[in-house]
Every structure is written in C-alpha cells, then in structure tokens.
Image (tube, rainbow, N blue to C red):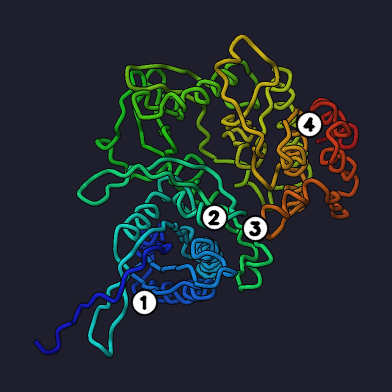
Amino acid sequence: MAGMAETATDGQLRHASVLFSGIHNSSALSAQLHASEMAELFAQYHSQASQAIVEHGGAHLQFTGDGLVAVFTDTHESANPPGARQAIAAALALTLAAHECRSWLAQRFPARDLGPFAIGVGLHCGSITLYRLGVAHNSQVVPIGETVNIAVRLQAATRELGWSLAASKAVLTRAGNGIQTGAQTVLAIKGAKAVALMLEALEVTGLAISAGDKAHGMKIGTALTTNAEMSARLAQVALGSRLKSLKAPSFDLDAVPVRLNGYRIVRKIGSGGMTEVYLAERQSDGLSVVLKILHSSAKNAAEQLLPFIQEYALLSKISHPHVVRIHDQGFTDDHIYIAMEYFERGDLRQLFGREMTQKRVLGIIKEVASALDAIHKEGIIHRDIKPENIMQRADGSIALADFGIAQSMQPTQDTDFMPEYGSGAVGTPYYMSPEQASGQAATAQSDLYSLGVMMFEMLTGKRPFVADSLALLLEAHRHAQTPALPAAHAHLQGIAAKLMHKTPALRYASAQDLMADIDRLNPQA
C-alpha cells in the first residue's frame, strides 16, 4: 500500500540510559499564552534543550509535545564517561536551559504575571528497542520498551515529589562517583502485565566534574547553583505551603485519601517517602494547620516512624515565639499525624530583595538567634539553618521550622528510639558548616555558622561561597576566607567573620552572645 508508513526494527541495545523530560506547568502557561506564543516558547526551549542533549552525547532525541526523550549509551572506549553519567550531565544542563527560558519568559511577557517555567527529568537505564518509523527518506528512530516507560514515570513523579531530577538507583550506580543526591524514596511503578515494580529513586542535585569528564566535553558550569534553585522552586509548587498554589481552587475533595477526626482536609500540598502533607482546618476553631501524616500500615512504615516521632518529641519541648508551633500529635488505626503551624506568607526566601534593609536583616537574625538559643538550651541542634526553613507569619515575625534532621545533643531515656545518623554530611551544602562538610558531628556552633551564611546572603544578595561542584563548594566552606561585606555593611564584618569562623570554638559561644553583639553595634536593630 503505497504512501503508508513502514515500521521496521532498527535494533536493540542491551544497556542504555534513557532521559525523559517534561514541562510541569505547560497547561497553565498555555492558558495564559496564545498558540503562536506557546510555539515561540517551545522553539526557544527546544533549541537550548537539543544543544544540551547533543553536547553530552545523547542520541535519538525526540520531542513529544512538551516532553523530550533521549538515549545515552556506553561507548567502546573505556576512557569515555559512562552513558549514565552523560545522561545526568545532560539532565543538569536541561535545568540551565529551563532557567534561561524562565528569564526569557519574564522579558518576553513582562506584564503577564506568568508562573515559573519548570521542568522535571526522569532517568533510568536498561535494555531498549530502537524502531525505525516512516518511509525510507523520511524516517526516524524511536526508542521504546520498559526502560523508557520507567523514565517517563520517574519524570511524572518529580512533580509530586518537588524534585527537578529523579534517577533510579541503577543509573546512579552505573554513573560512577561524584553524583550529588538529595532526598530518596521508593516508587511503585506499574510495569509489564500490570505488575507493580518497587523502584528506588533518588533526587539528583549536582555532579562533580572529574578531569576525565572535562576532557570529553562535559559542561556543567553553574548547574549546581541553578539546579538547587529549581529544586526549591519545584518543592514550593509541590508542597504549596509557601506559594500561591495553596490557594488553587482546583483541589478535588473527593480525592483526599485520609479522614481525621477534628480536622477538615482542605487540600494535599505535598508528599515524600511514606509521609503526606495536607493543609487542613481545625474544626473546633477554624484554625488553618499543616497536617503531616505517616501511613502506619504502609510498607517500611516502621523505618519512617522513628524520625517522624523524633520531630514531634523535639519540638514538643519548645514553646518559643520564633519556633514553629506544634498543635497536636495523634494516632489512628491507619495514621500517625502531626498538626503544626501554617505559614500562608511562605518562607524567608520570598522576602529577599529590596525589603532586605540592614535593619530588617539584623532584626531577622536576632529572631532566629533567639530561636536557636531556645532550642540549644534544650539540647537540640537544628543542622539545616537556611532561608527555606525560616517561615513568615502574617504579623511579620518569623519562625524556625523543619526539624526533620534535627538532633538531640543530650542522651535521654528515649535514646534507643532515636534514629542513628551516619558519618556523612547532613544539611544543605550552601549553608553547611565546615565540620558538617567534613562529616563530623554538628554542634550549636554549626547552626551559628549556617546563620552567618544566611546573614551574609541577606545583606549582599549572594551566597558567600559558590562553586561548580559539590566537592569544591564543601572545600570552600572548610578553607575559604569569609568574603568582605560591602562598604555599607563593613561594620558588621566582625560579626560575619566570627559566625563563619572555620574553627567552631572561635565562633560565638552561644546565640545569646551573638544577639548581645548585634545590640552593641546596632542598638536600634
């Protein structure tokens, strides 16, 4: 039958890494842009995405609407980076392309108030089949198979998880050393014959480039910086409690999978691992709260139970105006939950910019320091001080939140129920103390170091230490000198330098001492 497309098997690859990327908010953007404008946006992004894929050795690149798929294979030359490593590098490069498209959108449509341009990437490796579709002179090779399907499902999961890049453990194992990862979870993915595959997935946040990588043209550049920003932005979309998505009217109440006596579930605002997070209303008084729920009947729930209970146990000790309020903890036959304070105005990051006057910065630092003073006196180290964990109340005050990786300094009768932490670094790399960067135990002075990094960023609009790889960033925390503050803030250099001293013993002995120093230099702060 002349004119009909011919289909022929082009070949099979026993092992390849598949990258699938999609635009998270293309539907929202298409509702605000005309068809011609969406075509212009896609052309802008596809051009940059294609370059990122090709530069990192990708093949069989296909665009499917707002998604793209590419294949990365190992070469016969042992000196070349594995295909999985090139796929990770390409995925990170895509986040740079998305970052540039976000800037392009803002400049092209300055008055539209468009949402952020956000992508998610899924990576998996295994065998694939290459099919040649079309007639001889107008054909293309398309990858198909279970490996491609899993990459697609990993990409779909990034929206719910709030990740930029989700990779299967198989990809990371094959990619070699130097892959920076964040959170991890287990996903149930429906495979062939409707059999559910339990897949371990990890969030990829960066890649340390080796000399061999550079020799073969791998270009990460500022991917560490940009990908961290993308992850934060996507987490805000998924967790909603910090952005406008909390107010979205499209939530289907019938889809809520939990019911808790005493609370009316408003909407789901996030999930991760075995926990889910909901915005809810306390029925007794109409108070808006955030419900963090662990499904006690779920597989591996016992492993999640200990840190879940620990977070409540630590916070229940604290009653302080600048620490997140915990309203309740409860147990049902199916759920364990914590009801905590809801912050409609979002986190401190939303204030960065013109509102960050010196007086405002010092006021915030004093409020965070007072919170640290309170938790340190209770023997608690936060271990992850950063703007995203400092929340804004409606009255303009702030509260220290997210004690998920906090740790008690004092042994108690409940020690046996506390999770053990490995010797690896714990915290967020841009705000991590030298001792945390070295995998050593954190102390109260570690929290003060992170507060110093945050203070520097608020005063200057930039972080004191940035780098092209995680290894170089941690090295800067361990050894680089604290940069000079601008002239307008020069009188605060001593405070910044003491907060960020490389030796913990030479930092402030306590958060209270820091507050006293601020009052001495700036009595009106």
State which tag comes first along the sequence, 2 or 3: 3
Q: Which residue is mark 2?
A: 230
From what the image shows, is residue 89 above or below residue 189?
below
Q: Are marks 2 and 1 in contact (CB under 8 Å)?
A: no
For the C terminus, the image quarter is: top right
User: Which residue is located at x 77 percent, y 41 percent?
Assistant: 434
Q: Quadrant of residue 248?
A: top left
Q: CA distance from mark 4 to mark 2?
A: 29 Å
Q: CA distance from mark 4 to mark 3?
A: 28 Å
State which tag comes first along the sequence, 4 or 2: 2
Q: Which residue is mark 1?
A: 36
Compared across the picture, whether 247 is left or right of 374 comes to left
State which tag comes first along the sequence, 1 or 3: 1
Circle number at residue 445: 4
Q: Amino acid at mark 4?
A: Gln
Q: Amino acid at mark 1?
A: Ser
Q: Which residue is mark 3?
A: 208
From what the image shows, is residue 202 above or below residue 444?
below
Q: Nearer the viewer, mark 1 or mark 4?
A: 4
- Percent across and percent down for residue 27 are 34, 60
Q: Nearer the viewer, mark 4 or mark 2?
A: 4
Q: Nearer the viewer, mark 2 or mark 3?
A: 3
Q: Amino acid at mark 2?
A: Met
Compared across the picture, whether 293 is left or right of 381 comes to left
